[in-house]
Amino acid sequence: MEKPLLPLSSQLSLQNRVYEVTLNSAFLSWKEVETRPKRTSGNIYGPLKAAGSHYVPVCEIISVQETEEDCPSTDTGKWHKVPQSVAESNQHAFTVCYVERTQKHRWRCSDVTLHCTDRTLCLQWVQAIREQLSLLTIRPKRLLVYINPYGGKHHGKRIYEQKVAPIFSRASISTDVIVTEWANHARDHLKTEADLKKYDGVVCVGGDGMFSEIIHGLISRTQCDSGVDQDCSDEPLIPCSLRIGIIPAGSTDCICYATVGSNDPVTSALHIVVGDSQPMDVCSIHHNNTFLRYSVSLLGYGFYGDVLTDSERKRWMGPARYDISGVKTFLSHRYYEGTISFLPADENVGTPRDKLQCRSGCNICRLPSADKQVSKDEESVSDIETKGVWKVIRGKFLAINAACMSCACPRSPKGLSPSAHLADGTADLILVRKCSRFDFLRHLLRHTNKDDQFDHPFVEVYRVRQFRFTPRYEDTDSELDLREAEGTGHKRFFSQICREHPACSCSLAHSSWNCDGEILPHAAIQVRVHCQLIKLFARGIEEQSVFEEPYALSAI
Ligand SMILES: Nc1ncnc2c1ncn2[C@@H]1O[C@H](COP(=O)(O)OP(=O)(O)OP(=O)(O)O)[C@@H](O)[C@H]1O
Ligand SMILES: CCCCCCCCCCCCC/C=C/[C@@H](O)[C@H](CO)NC(C)=O
Ligand SMILES: [Ca+2]
């Protein structure tokens, strides 16, 4: 068969009506040619429609296949019912499966079956669409998938098999699937064993903890392959080349929610299929000259550290553990003393209170940042950063939180820091000073509504590139020595500290850091944000206007 030339245009039938169907390099469109009154649809989220016209961007077509009439299509199991008159005259048909946007940033697979008068025409259409899809080289063809069967409500395996695998197979993506058997199985496999050259991306099925395993494996592997020492806190890190997909099946799913706009497995699978790419910042955390962990969402000391410590003992409860531990920690009302020093970000990246939310194609994330200038100027990141002036704050804090991104999640739809950016090379540092229980509750509740959680006299927020935290008394002894002393019964020093905390009934002067849902072993840490160190199969949260008619049609 001859190679179809574009634009390709034919009169084809759909549900007993005749349509002018056109394919060019950007869109597949179909427009009714009959003159009778047109049916209008109330759903603005479907394929773009203008007076009976439908447009699907080629980059949002998932697959095309010849449809065998009166028999189930091979991958969906659905029967395609063809009205009698059409069936008689149009025996041949092809089905195009494409992305359809629904409410709350969710994507679905939708399909349209177009009937042709002869098979040659039908095959010509299938070939033309497939050729356009083959030009989309950003789409992954082979993926390495890790499933945590114990994340969230333990549904990871079922979610993957029932909702995600059929979409990958429809999009002709081949997969190697590993169901993890122990914690850190995925991390260690990626670090040392996986043949990464074979893949176009890595997918994790699980929550934020599982995602954390994947980034630790990939980042460590990349640094190791390039001879970068992760213990050296001011050495620039090498960005990872493989993109990561998240199929949400955890308890918080904050990284998925904040990068896609929902925690829906089908939506995530479709972002992987269309080959989206969203760069993301990563914080490295060191204690003296020892690398501890990476973080992409919340790094929280005090309240969120204590919630996590308590909730780990309640893992059997599933996602509800965070609510129970949240209330318990709130009631305990512990505060912690220490010193925070930080290097503020340049003003051109905005401020945490500027209400400029990070959205798909964000202008702030596209600005050249200190990290990104490194290769151009051949100046190291630390050279650039030492030009800034460090600020120092001492005090008593209920919570110290650093958010590299908004940390939006179903519990807090605008997140811990609603204006934080995914890929600007900064984190928002939120300091909640000692205040009354009532005030702290008002602050916490504002995470769940539209009010500004930073608009309190006891809350400060800074956009930073680096920060350090030293708990009080850290200067006299190492905290591990203190913990050992506690373990061996030498509690005098500790009880002295705690007598200085009237509200604190426990024997610990230190909290722990909650690092993306994992507990860190040290309270004194140094943190640096690495701009765009990793990439996800995502595009950031889309503005509503992307899928409303006027915008979309003016873009055509
Ligand atoms: N096979 C396994 N057995 C036990 N633990 C595992 C296994 N695979 C992964 N893990 C660990 O399970 C922990 C929790 O996983 P995950 O993040 O998927 O769910 P979650 O904690 O319920 O959700 P979230 O992190 O969103 O709050 C992770 O720290 C991960 O290292
Ligand atoms: C007493 C009322 C409390 C209401 C408080 C609501 C605030 C919710 C804010 C949640 C932000 C979660 C940030 C994400 C953190 C994840 O990294 C981590 C691991 O999944 N999850 C948690 C809960 O630590
Ligand atoms: Ca950031």
Image (cartoon, rainbow, N blue to C red):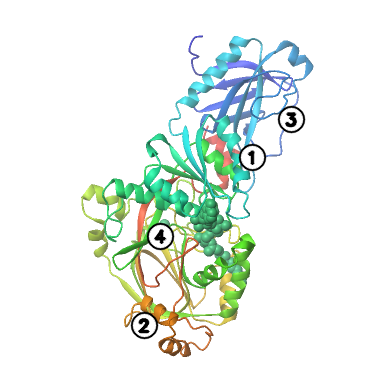
Q: Nearer the viewer, mark 1 or mark 4?
A: 1
First along the sequence among labels 1 and 4: 1
Looking at the rendered structure, the kind of residue marked 4 is Gly
Is ligand 1 less than 8 Å from the beta carbon at label 3?
no
| Cβ atoms at labels 4 and 2 below 8 Å apart | no
Visible in this render: residue 258? no
User: Upstream in the sequence, badge 3 or badge 2?
Assistant: 3
Provide the residue designation for mark 1: 162
Q: Which residue is mark 4?
A: 350
Q: Earlier in the sequence, mark 2 or mark 1?
A: 1
Residue 540 at x, y percent in the picture: 49, 48
For the point 49% across and 24% down, the residue is 132
SS at mark 2 in the image: loop
Residue farthest along the left direction in this orientation? 378
* Picture disc at residue 39: 3
Tell me which image quadrant ligand 3 sits in. bottom left
Instruction: Give how far across and how far down residue 405 sits, in percent.
Output: 46, 57
Q: Which one is in front, 19 or 202?
A: 202
Q: Position of residue 300 (x, y in %)?
A: 47, 68
Left or right placement of residue 100 versus residue 471 in this view: right
- Mark 2 is on which residue type? Tyr
Observer-side mark, 3 or 2, equals 2
Name the N-terminal-most of marks 4 and 2.
4
Q: Which residue is mark 2?
A: 473
